[in-house]
Amino acid sequence: MSVKWMLVFPIATACFVGSSSAGKVLVWPVDNSHWINMKFILNELTDRGHQVTVLLPSFFMAVKASEPSPFQLEEIPFLFSREDMDTMLQDFLFMWSYESNELSFWQFFIKTHDFSREMERRNRILCDRVVLNQTLMERLESVGFDILIADPLLPCGELVAEKLHLPFVYTFRFSVGNTMECVCGVIPAPPSFVPASLGGLTDRMSFMQRTRNMLFYALHDILFHQVLWKDWSKYYSDVLGRPTTLCETMGKAEIWLIRTYWDFEFPRPLLPNFEFVGGLHCQPAKPLPKEMEEFVKSSGEHGIVVFSLGSMIKNLTDDKSNMVALALSQLPQKVIWRYQGKRPETLGANTRLYDWIPQNDLLGHPKTKAFITHGGTNGIYEAIYHGIPMVGTPMFGDQPDNIAHMRAKGMAVELNIHTMTAQDLVDAVNTVIHNATYKENAVRLSKIHHDQPMKPLDRAVFWIEFVMRHKGAKHLRVAAHDLTWYQYHCLDVIAFLISCVALFMFIIVKCCTFCCRKCGITRKTKLE
Amino acid sequence: MSVKWMLVFPIATACFVGSSSAGKVLVWPVDNSHWINMKFILNELTDRGHQVTVLLPSFFMAVKASEPSPFQLEEIPFLFSREDMDTMLQDFLFMWSYESNELSFWQFFIKTHDFSREMERRNRILCDRVVLNQTLMERLESVGFDILIADPLLPCGELVAEKLHLPFVYTFRFSVGNTMECVCGVIPAPPSFVPASLGGLTDRMSFMQRTRNMLFYALHDILFHQVLWKDWSKYYSDVLGRPTTLCETMGKAEIWLIRTYWDFEFPRPLLPNFEFVGGLHCQPAKPLPKEMEEFVKSSGEHGIVVFSLGSMIKNLTDDKSNMVALALSQLPQKVIWRYQGKRPETLGANTRLYDWIPQNDLLGHPKTKAFITHGGTNGIYEAIYHGIPMVGTPMFGDQPDNIAHMRAKGMAVELNIHTMTAQDLVDAVNTVIHNATYKENAVRLSKIHHDQPMKPLDRAVFWIEFVMRHKGAKHLRVAAHDLTWYQYHCLDVIAFLISCVALFMFIIVKCCTFCCRKCGITRKTKLE
């Protein structure tokens, strides 16, 4: 196990109301795009003089312990290699992206279930290797960390924090149906106007959509409680040596840093310890590499279109890539396409392929007219930041939901990647470029994004440092955490009040009956 | 009617993410302590180069149109003089503060009802004099205001905004039972952990307290809907020439600036367009007047106690003032007492009376050990800001509730001003000075108050300027505003789902019955 002490950046000048002396930060990360986002927070923390230690599984793809890093990397050796994890993930994404249309619901469900179970099994082994490794835990304890930052997509971070008696902060995009945020974080989500994540709905729902939304919440509540959390709750109780649940432990998070903001999110109730810091990774565009800049400049007045399906989709089927390339070749714009697959035969002269693109810098280039995207949150935020309208071709995860948000906000056209034709793609790109409302809405959302009291990254770092300064943020924690679900909804009070009314009515009826009978007897007696 | 164009301060350097060019601000104010708070926002706006026009009733006590002001004062002549209003208010406060203990519930209710009705009648006349005065409205329209800022304690501000087609922002402390905020502003308030204002409860309630809290919300909901808002809704519909309600109009507020923060408030759900900006009027202490500073310094190591019952209570009964003076004379501290009534005979040598005191500067003085207060929000925030523990003697309005908050947060001892003895007061002051937990909690809350991402006044001004820049803040407005109450709570969906289940059960039962009968007949036939 290698522990590497890396470069610590000089302490930046404190610019907030409060300022922290250099602290020690422990990190429980999640791979791929989750890391891309979290990295910006960690970089800012090191820039401000804090010492950041990342618990890094050896299969982690976004960071390698052997490469230089501004963070201290505490590598956790693992049974499965990086390549093995990558293959498993790619197979699953390929199934979800291309085969899901041809599978029956049950086939799809079983494949998804198997994948989730395997991921969970691996995550449990990973967790064992941390919390049950006494040497490691003692060493971590001896460092004297001030805080743990975790992405709660995969459990265990909060358990490490509890074992080390550390306050912890989450940085999170979402859980399915917002179940973790709502049930464990107790953030209110009235199903009448807060669409459950992955439900594909907006905040304006018809009666049937509201019904669907409510059922979606309820079903995921049951699914998480009865299936997904059960084993973890037992595991947490065993490790901590006291009865607890995963959800109760998660509810101890001091602050939830959510990776969206009201430019993207439909406005909804929140809690004082939820901060919406979407787009914290966005920055003004930097100059492009020379070759790319020349290609962009050569586009003339038509400008360019940027096309990326994100870091996880590396290739398409030949048919699909040829169809897409053919469509792009018909555009008057120059196209920059991030694509690692086989070069399509139909690729036009106006289109260039790149293994990797400086996406933020490209979207911030004055020549950029549109963005064709799979709809990942990071890419969407770069488009909002720079005010670029989008064509969304969502594939899996939160992507359909993200594009539904952007469509509702008038900044995107959506295409079904499974069924779209070349002409559909050409039409969609032309629509977002030539129908002025898309650009206007993109600019409007961009203005909203830029016009905040404080930049999202600064807010995120402020609250992390706040927790370090005050050893928590208990003044932001609602008392609802200590209520049962029926107390929270006042069902016991309602039952009590209904009983009182029923008892009152019963007494009234009995009294009336008694009086009537009495009168009846009297009258009868009189008549007799 | 006099219109005075006053001094406009030079434009301050923009320090936010966004910055506004000089704009025009119209103000619908409320008198006394409400004005004291709002004035700080308006001063900051003039400092930042905006032109502020205040619609000033001629009976307004906190500002006189004849005195110099940084604001343009649009005086609204009124039937009732300032003295008349003051007498009415003083009589009512005297009744509430001293006589209420001797009155029956009904006598108190009738007196309160009469006062409220008279205040409402006068406010309606005032409203008439603005919205029905076509010359004034045309003149206001011709100015080209960008925004209206209103305190919604007394209706009409939002009506003026609607007539002038202006976006408006509220600055507000609370409504009884939070009815305006919850029903019109649709901020969620689960009765299980959000105590209704004026209910005197905290966020940790027993079963019976939750029941009381729920009934308190429900009764005020009915009271406001069925009594207090009915006439206003008809009036608003008549003036605007379309069917509407007071509550619907209030719900159009772009931002609600609430005069508390999580140092004082129990954490609760909020909405993106609610900003908690409590303590925006607090500032670092300035030097005291020479004579006062000498008196304070002479207190030695014992320090001083600051005593004020606020700007509205000018005198006490002779018995009460003598009892209080006697208690204060027994303290080893020097006492600074803001009091305009007759000099008590028992006044000790350690106590000095002042018509007015620089309260914030006194509370920020290093010699200050404790604050005896009626529990007004402004004073409480000055104590939080400077970390001074309190003895609360609440009298009326939100004061009992405010002191309940401070007691729950461990920063105050409460006394009943009607029943307390001199010894009670001495003991209470000694407790908050010598029991270290009160000072520790005061310092803890003070640290929380000072450690915000952005100062409350800056946040308030940011959002006002945001509304001016963007002509509103619709991206923060939840879709719940467009739902009926039963849609909001999904009662229609629940009824539908219950019906579906009932129908399903009915069909199952019928099928079973049918099958059983069929089997029965068959068996019977066979047997025959």
Image (cartoon, coloured by chain):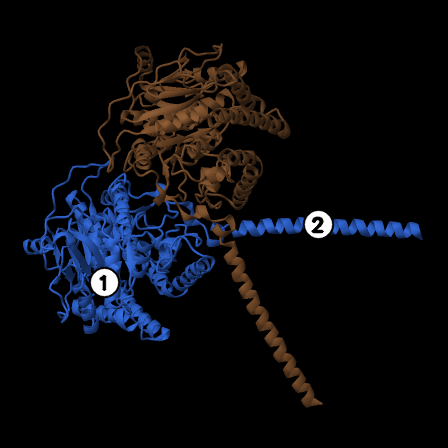
Chain colours: A brown, B blue
Which residue corresponds to mark 1? B426
Quadrant of the image occupied by residue B79: bottom left
Above or below for A413 versus B420: above
Closer mark to the observer between disc 1 and disc 2: 1
Pick whichever, B214 or B22, lies toward us. B214
Label located before the other in sequence (1 or 2): 1
Q: Name the residue under label 2.
A: B507
Q: In this view, does A400 lie to the left or right of B526?
A: left
- In the rendered image, residue A300, in percent from the top left (x then y), is placed at 31, 16
What amino acid is labelled 2 in the image? Ile
Q: Where is residue A78 in the image (x, y as percent from the top left)?
A: 49, 19
Looking at the rendered image, the quarter that the N terminus of chain B falls into is bottom left
- Evaluate whether residue B237 shows in this view: yes
The kind of secondary structure element at disc 1 is helix
* In this rendering, position of residue B466 left or right of residue A389: left
Residue at x 44% of width, y 22% of height = A32
